[in-house]
Image (cartoon, helix red, strand yellow):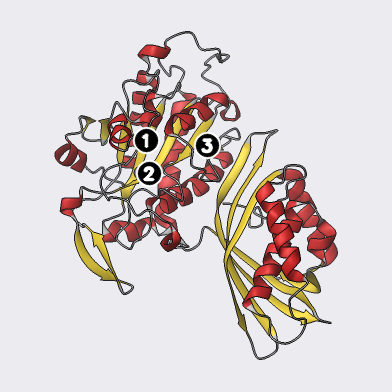
Amino acid sequence: MLSKRFCLQVSLVGIVCALCQQVRAAEATATQVEKSGPISEGEATTFVKEYYVALSRADLPTVVAKFGESVNYGEDRQRDRAFIEKDLRDYIARWPVLNLKPEAVAVSTADDRSSTITFNLIYSVANDRNKKSLSGHSTNTWIVRRVSGKIQIISQREVVHADPTRSVEKTPRPQSHEDEEALSDEELRKQGDTQIEVPTAQSTSKPSTRPTKPVRKSELPSNFVVALDIGHTPLKGGAISARGVFEYEFNRRLVAELLPQLQSLGFTSCFVINPQGDEIRLPQRAAKAHEQNADLLLAIHHDSVKDKYLKTWQHDGKTQKYCDDFHGYSIFISDKNTKPAGSRLFAGRLGQALLKAGFTPTLHHVDQENRPIIDKEKGIYTFNDLVVLKTAKMPAVLLECGVIVNRAEEEKLNSLAYRKRLIDAIGRAIQDFASAGDRSD
Ligand SMILES: [Zn+2]
């Protein structure tokens, strides 16, 4: 479980320039807003921005002053400002690096002059010292009231990884439903990407400068570093689900849930490669895993089918594409990876764990893309030129968690209980793999 308030973390030092600019913009508008009457949307937006900007500056007095004397703070309990200040201070200490982006602020005013502000928060927090990081999004509901002309928070609620449809309509560049765009050399070439000359296992077989850790059967999970890769980015969202949601949203949500699950299993050194969803190149993802001494790279994706299998239906007043004929997970490895045997070994453990948890693999990549399958029962394919896998210098596996163009499977993947089963199985597979004395290669 993610801590309810982890996204309220503050960077003591590193404040992103963009945030500073937001501060100035927010300050400029704050002086212009009206100080009485119903709270307008502009005023609410400024208030929320100012709050997060102050948090980002570790300016707790300013943040705390935005609360009323007594606040319904998160868990149906009234708290005073001293409690809130301490709570926020604790989190500053735990998460020194922070990036928070409120968006889609809306306000509705009740009869009693209090207003409800709702918004989404895109967050990524990190602690460089212990290499921990968390990212994802949350939906927030604040009840505010104007007291002596000043807006004050009287209730603050946050639900982490809520509605997966959040803001995806705003994401530009709708892409093909086909395959894993921009994932293989082939695809990169088609798109004219200049960075296709990526080293393969053959060209990088020089000894690594990475300190090799002795492999011991009793190796502590805390020493085993798992790099989690969120497939795609907010701007290039990957496949589009049957209900019109970008794959990136599914990938990000699952990783945001998997990370604390792994941490609770003792894998305290696991981290997310690109928590902010920056537009980084695929080889950079593997490079970041290497920089942080990852023992395993797991890329999380959600699957689609070839365009010709898609039909249309109406959802939420919009025409969407779907295909209910294929469902299930699939696992990909690259034999061009520096650690092909380790990759196969982990793929096997992962397939086994998923089968045991009641999931079934999809075999549609064989017919639709001629993808070689090395284990039909466990749903393991080779895809040698998948850039993120082949450039990895550690065992690396890509998991397609399910087929999101399948309407029923999309619904399942939106269910917390289903995802819990999924992340439990992934966690078990990583435990198995980490504790295996011989990880090969
Ligand atoms: Zn994908």
Instruction: State whether residue 74 appears in this view.
Output: no
Residue beneath disc 3:
273
Residue 202 found in image quarter: top left
Disc 1 to disc 2, C-alpha distance: 7 Å
Three-letter amino acid code at the position of disc 1: Leu
Instruction: State whether residue 63 appears in this view.
Output: yes
Label annotation for residue 429: none
Q: Secondary structure at mark 2?
A: strand
Residue beneath disc 2:
301
Three-letter amino acid code at the position of disc 3: Ile
On the image, the x and y values in percent for residue 351 come to: 32, 35
- The residue positioned 61% from the left and 56% from the top of the image is 101
Q: Nearer the viewer, residue 15 or 305?
A: 15
Q: Is residue 52 left or right of residue 358?
A: right
Looking at the image, the residue that sits furthest to the bottom is 111
On the image, the x and y values in percent for residue 27 come to: 76, 64
- The residue positioned 58% from the left and 67% from the top of the image is 119
Query: Is the residue marked by circle 3 packed among few (<14), some (14-19), or many (20+) residues within 10 Å?
Result: many
On the image, the x and y values in percent for residue 198 come to: 39, 23
For residue 156, above or below residue 40: above
Query: Is the residue marked by circle 1 packed among few (<14), some (14-19), or many (20+) residues within 10 Å?
Result: many
